[in-house]
Image (cartoon, coloured by chain):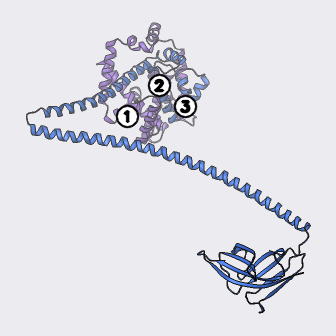
Chain colours: A blue, B purple
């Protein structure tokens, strides 16, 4: 902007000297000054100067005969260039018009065969051009749709990622809370266990076998204070069933107790089943315990029978 | 080397010494001389001197005489030395009573008071038509590359025009300043051609 002010004589003597030293010493600065002069004249002709600049231009610059010549030359040049561009555009349309007129004049000639051939060629060219034009348009439209779709997918992806991250954070909080709850519960159970007096629960191992009087026959003698009796059923086969069921009957056939769907997880080892049975069920009698297993196919198989006698005290 | 009229009339030997002072290489010295002359001309024009050619000649003449008289000239930059002398010449020009009648100046100023009426006031319709016709003729004599260049340079409005100029500079592998200078020269060429055409 200083260059323009320099040209308009709006700078102080000192500022003028500074600019002059720069454009005398450096060619690029001098070229920039020439360009500024060019642009100033162009802006004046096209009415793009501010009021102050315009006034100054007219009083200071146009008074100079060489400048006035420059302005006239530039104005004439811009007009010729404008006319030239307009003429070229007009020329393009007139060429198209002339071509079409030529085609129609050929069609009107007496030689119908030529006329027909030209017409066919023209028709194909026209159809081809239209086809190409519409194809390009359609492809552009598809492209912009795809771009829009792509953008939507990207947005959704970002949104889902945000939600997942929020969910993960929430899950983390829940897991933490659960862990705290479990710890509290464990502590409470430990406290409760410490306060609760241990109940006496006699334990017996039972060997498989159904005949009385053989080695497998077990006598269960437990005090009346015992609430439950722990039975450990030993098996001489591998216990690999999905579920287990137990039925305890008196030797006369009356069912005393049963438990079904004991899961494999409850079987501590592969050949031992542990169970707690309330002592209140038993009287002074002989009992038969049957251990059955449910296979993966859903069939129930009897694994072992255990015979034992109960002698309460 | 195209040496201007007045200097050509000077003593060839003095001029040779002067060029030698500008640069030991004669060809390079010739370029520097032309360059300085052009800068002086523009300096006087931009500072409102109506007799730019004469003032530029006086400046060169003064330096030339100092150099050939064997005066010691202490300067790190020849261009700045010429500028110093040119300022003195300009100062003297301002002090000198002007030969141009006051009426002429007033008339000249009045002619440009309104750019909208510029055509009507400065030139009669006929003169303007002649000016445009001359410009057309001069433009048609320009080589094709220069015509394309000038058309491209002034094509478009504001931003579009700036972009066009950047593309032109890239296309010609020139800096924007070099492109402006090239345009300035083409316009200068046209201006001279139109002046000549109007006289015929």
Q: Is residue B85 left or right of residue B33?
A: right
Residue on which the image places disc 1: B149
Residue extending furthest left? Answer: A110
Q: Is residue B82 left or right of residue A12?
A: left
Q: Are marks 3 and 1 on the same chain?
A: yes
Which comes sooner in the sequence, label 1 or label 2? 2
Residue B13 visible to the viewer: no
Q: Would you identify the image quadrant in which residue B150 lies?
A: top left
Spot occupied by residue B34 in the image (x, y as percentages of width and height): 44, 33
Q: Quadrant of the C terminus of chain A?
A: bottom right
Residue on which the image places disc 3: B81
Which comes sooner in the sequence, label 2 or label 3? 2
Q: Are marks 2 and 3 on the same chain?
A: yes
Residue on which the image places disc 2: B56
Element class at badge 1: helix
Spot occupied by residue A65 in the image (x, y as percentages of width and height): 43, 17
Please state the chain letter of the residue tagged with numbered disc 3 in the rendered image: B
Give me the C-alpha separation between circle 3 and circle 1.
36 Å
Spot occupied by residue A278 in the image (x, y as percentages of width and height): 82, 74
Residue extending furthest front? Answer: A252
Which residue is painted at 83% across and 80% down in the image?
A203
Q: Is residue A281 above or below residue B170?
A: below
């Amino acid at each position: 902007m200083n260059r323009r002010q320099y040209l308009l004589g709006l700078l102080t003597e000192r500022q003028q000297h500074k600019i002059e030293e720069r454009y005398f010493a450096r060619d690029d600065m001098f070229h920039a000054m020439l360009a500024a002069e060019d642009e100033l004249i162009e802006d004046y002709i096209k009415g793009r100067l501010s009021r102050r600049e315009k006034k100054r231009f007219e009083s200071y610059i146009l008074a100079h005969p060489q400048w006035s010549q420059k302005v006239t030359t530039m104005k004439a040049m811009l007009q010729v260039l404008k006319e030239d561009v307009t003429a070229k555009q007009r020329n393009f349309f007139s060429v198209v018009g002339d071509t079409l007129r030529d085609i129609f004049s050929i069609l009107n000639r007496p030689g119908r065969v030529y006329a027909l051939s030209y017409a066919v060629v023209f028709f194909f060219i026209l159809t081809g051009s239209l086809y190409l034009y519409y194809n390009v348009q359609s492809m552009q439209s598809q492209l912009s749709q795809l771009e829009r779709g792509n953008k939507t997918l990207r947005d959704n992806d970002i949104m889902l990622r945000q939600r997942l991250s929020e969910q993960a954070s929430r899950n983390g909080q829940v897991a933490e809370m659960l862990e705290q709850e479990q710890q509290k519960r464990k502590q409470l159970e430990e406290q409760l266990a410490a306060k609760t007096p241990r109940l006496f629960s006699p334990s017996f191992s039972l060997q498989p076998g159904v005949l009385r009087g053989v080695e497998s026959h077990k006598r269960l003698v437990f005090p009346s204070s015992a609430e439950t009796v722990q039975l450990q059923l030993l098996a001489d086969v591998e216990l690999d069933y999905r579920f287990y069921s137990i039925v305890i009957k008196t030797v006369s056939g009356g069912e005393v107790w049963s438990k079904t769907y004991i899961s494999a997880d409850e079987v501590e080892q592969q050949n031992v089943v542990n169970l707690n049975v309330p002592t209140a069920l038993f009287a002074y009698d002989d009992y038969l315990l049957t251990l059955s297993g449910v296979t993966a196919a859903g069939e129930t198989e009897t694994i072992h029978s255990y015979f034992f006698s109960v002698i309460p005290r | 080397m195209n040496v201007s009229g007045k200097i050509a009339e000077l003593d060839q030997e003095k001029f040779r010494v002067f060029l030698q002072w500008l640069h030991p290489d004669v060809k390079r010295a010739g370029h520097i001389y032309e360059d300085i002359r052009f800068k002086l001309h523009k300096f006087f024009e931009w500072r409102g001197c109506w007799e730019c050619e004469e003032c530029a000649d006086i400046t060169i003449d003064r330096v030339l005489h100092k150099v050939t008289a064997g005066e010691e000239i202490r300067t790190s930059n020849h261009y700045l030395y010429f500028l110093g002398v040119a300022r003195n010449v300009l100062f003297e020009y301002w002090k000198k009573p002007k030969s141009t009648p006051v009426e002429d100046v007033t008339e000249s100023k009045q002619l440009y008071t309104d750019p909208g009426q510029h055509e009507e006031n400065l030139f009669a319709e006929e003169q303007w038509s002649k000016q445009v016709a001359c410009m057309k003729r001069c433009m048609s004599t320009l080589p094709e590359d220069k015509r394309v260049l000038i058309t491209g340079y002034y094509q478009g409005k504001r931003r579009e025009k700036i972009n066009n100029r950047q593309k032109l500079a890239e296309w010609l592998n020139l800096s924007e300043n070099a492109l402006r200078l090239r345009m300035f020269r083409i316009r200068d060429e046209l201006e001279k051609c139109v002046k000549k055409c109007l006289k015929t």
